[in-house]
Image (cartoon, rainbow, N blue to C red):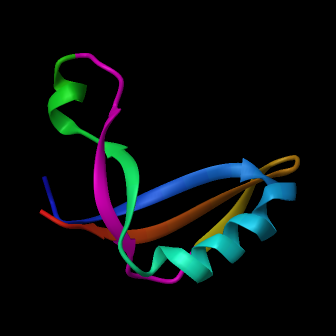
Amino acid sequence: MPTEFNLSFVMDYNDWGAWMAWVNQNAYAWFLMDIPNQTSAAAGKTLCTGTGEIRFISDVTWSIVGEGSVQATVAAEIKV
């Protein structure tokens, strides 16, 4: 599994401000998050099955993806 990857999050536009506040306060330090697991995906199981210690390492980019929805994308790294 790579140690650096991109994550995308889709959320309601009303949640965007609170999410960004949390990111700016917490996500550039190490934190725990359920992350994709390639082994589980290959076995046909739910993709997000493992918890990893990650941190964001780039600015968040965002785009509007539908009426009232925002997609945020950021680079992250995982401790291995």
Name the residue nearer the viewer: 59 or 53. 53
Q: Quadrant of residue 79?
A: bottom left
Q: Quadrant of the C terminus?
A: bottom left
Magenta includes 42? Answer: no
**Does 68 sit above or below residue 62?**
above
How many numbered marks have been drawn onto this rendered protein structure?
Answer: 0
Q: Residue at x 35, y 47 (%)?
A: 35
Q: Residue at x 80, y 70 (%)?
A: 17
Q: Residue at x 29, y 61 (%)?
A: 53
Q: Residue at x 64, y 71 (%)?
A: 22
Q: Quadrant of residue 24?
A: bottom right
Residue that protrudes farthest toward the top in the picture: 44
- Image coords of residue 56 (percent x, y): 41, 75
Residue 5 placement, left or right of 23: left
Name the residue nearer the viewer: 23 or 7. 23
Residue 9 placement, left or right of 27: right
**Does 23 sit above or below residue 47?**
below
- Image coords of residue 64 (percent x, y): 76, 59
- Image coords of residue 42 (percent x, y): 17, 24
- Image coords of residue 21 (percent x, y): 70, 76
Magenta includes 58? Answer: yes
**Does 39 sit above or below residue 71?**
above
Start-end of magenta stretch: 44-60
